[in-house]
Amino acid sequence: MDNNVTKFGSMFAAIMGIAALGFGIMEFVGEEWGPLTAEGGTFTAWRAIILLCAGVIYLSSVTNFIDVRQIVKAVAASIMIWIVAAMDIWAMIAASIPSGAEEAGEPWFASGADFLAAYGPPYMPAMYLLVPSLVIIYFITRRRIAS
Amino acid sequence: MERALTADERWDLVDKITKEVVKVGAYKPGLRDALASLTVNPWTGIPFAIAVLYGFWTFFGEFAGLFTDGFFVRIFGTHWIPWLSGALEGLPDWLFTILVGDRAVFAEDFVGDPCFAAGGVLTTGLFMPFAVVLWAVIALFLVLAILEDTGYLPRLAVLVDTVLHKIGLHGFAIVPTLVSLGCNVPGVTATRLLETRKQRFMMIALLGVFVPCGAQIGMMEELIPGLIGWVFLTLAIGYLGFGWVLNKIWPGESPEILMDVPPYRAPQWSNILRKTWSRTRHFLMVAVPFVLLGCAIVMVLYATGAMDTIASGLEGFLAAVFGVPADATASLVVGFLRKDLAIGLLPIDAMTNYQVFISVILLTIYFPCLATFAMLLRELNWKEILATLGFLIVTIFVFGGILHLIGLAGGWY
């Protein structure tokens, strides 16, 4: 990998690290801020711990990003974020399918409007980290080409 | 006469042979190798394991919730149970009670969920395995198969090796433990991975007492989602604490082992689905007959008035030793057959949070279900079976009693 890519990688890891730490703290606070929510759920504290750890692991990969042992830290932190975000999306999917009605004669499945509404904001913090964390795939690909 | 080598001497010999035959060249790890090392290094591996286990439980909860709360509670609660109670209304009281349940549950003024409260073989007896437990178990087995086939499970074994060595086991003990979270029966079989009789005995005893099966977890997730974290924390403390004691008092060896850790691989979905299906089918064949039998026994005990006699006989004892009300007796009786059914029969509305918590813990630790017990008979010798039963009795009184005392001291009743 050339110098520019390595520098970009370090920047990416630093920004993601700070963002994951920030979102991890938000999960601990557990409030709603506009389109972002960190309220409720059985595993809120666990999500917060995972995001905080992901943040620290990202930050530990900032230096010498060209080394595979450093890049892999950013990969692991990204996988941790993907797991949390994937479970948030899975929870949305699971909530969007049944109608929630209990009486006989009412529909079993959610209407089109309710189905779509289940995917609207506010979103959990990990969902906001999901898209930027996918940038790690670029570094994995670049490394594969370089080697 | 030649003597056998000690474990240390054997390791020294391994080192010596390795030095002679292995040539170490320059090693350039790839990304996959680096990820493999990173996930067994405690500093990065433990947070990674927390993320994986979070995914495991969240997927399980949401998957089970989608089917159970989204569809099956309505299928049974709104359609099947009301229809069945109407269709079989003309049956004699004793037969109606056994097949459908207590007639009071179908009165206009009944407050509660008939799916759990009815108790009949064709109502609660079908609702629990097919509406609640089946989906939880499918989710658990599916995720377990993915963890196995990607190669993560052996890494988790390496990661927990140090902790498990403190209680005389080794990292691979995590495999039967995780399998038991699906069903204790294959979990007991999986203890064959362990090296010595001591380790197998210890593992089986700990599984039978401290590891709830997927069916139980499914019921907990449905009925006491807010307490499930505390239940698991308490059971984990018991697992490690009593494991440590067992290691000290039970004779035998706990040797070091070499673990073969395969590389990470993308799983084959056909394999995952085949494993999930085969384990789920086995679970259904073992569990459903016992749930139906459990419901029948409980309803016969109710119909004949025997349950009231048992409850009044045990009332003082249960309250004094464990702080559990007499209403919970029925579920404790059923717990011998199926613990999931027992949890479903707990009169949660009539109990305080701490009583529910202690009852669920007691149901988990007080006796393995019949199917698991049958496996114990097959896997252990008579001395070990007696020791397991002794361990069970001591654990119930010591652990249950300590929790009761903590509840009294905290004023949580």
Image (cartoon, coloured by chain):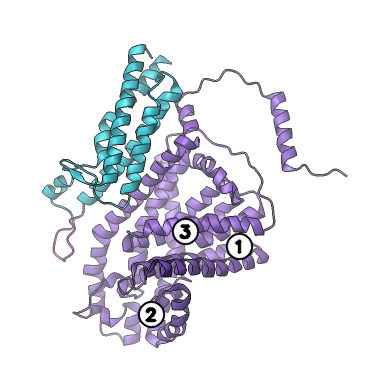
Q: Residue B166: image x %, image y %? A: 59, 49
> Which residue is at a point 27% across and 73% down the rendered structure image?
B114
* Quadrant (top left/top right/bottom left/bottom right) for the C terminus of chain A: top left
Disc 2 target residue: B299
Q: Secondary structure at mark 1?
A: helix
Q: Which residue lies under the disc numbered 3?
A: B235
Amino acid, disc 2: Met
Depth check: give the residue in front, B340 or B13: B13
Figure chain in cyan: A
Tag 3 secondary structure: helix
Q: Which chain is purple?
A: B
**How far separated are the C-alphas under marks 3 and 1?**
26 Å
Residue B281 relative to residue A135: left or right: right
Quarter of the view holding residue A75: top left
Residue B22 x/y as whole percent: 67, 24
Q: What range of the chain is rendered magenta?
A: A97-107
Please tell me which of labels 2 and 3 falls first in the chain. 3
Q: Identity of the amino acid at label 3?
A: Leu
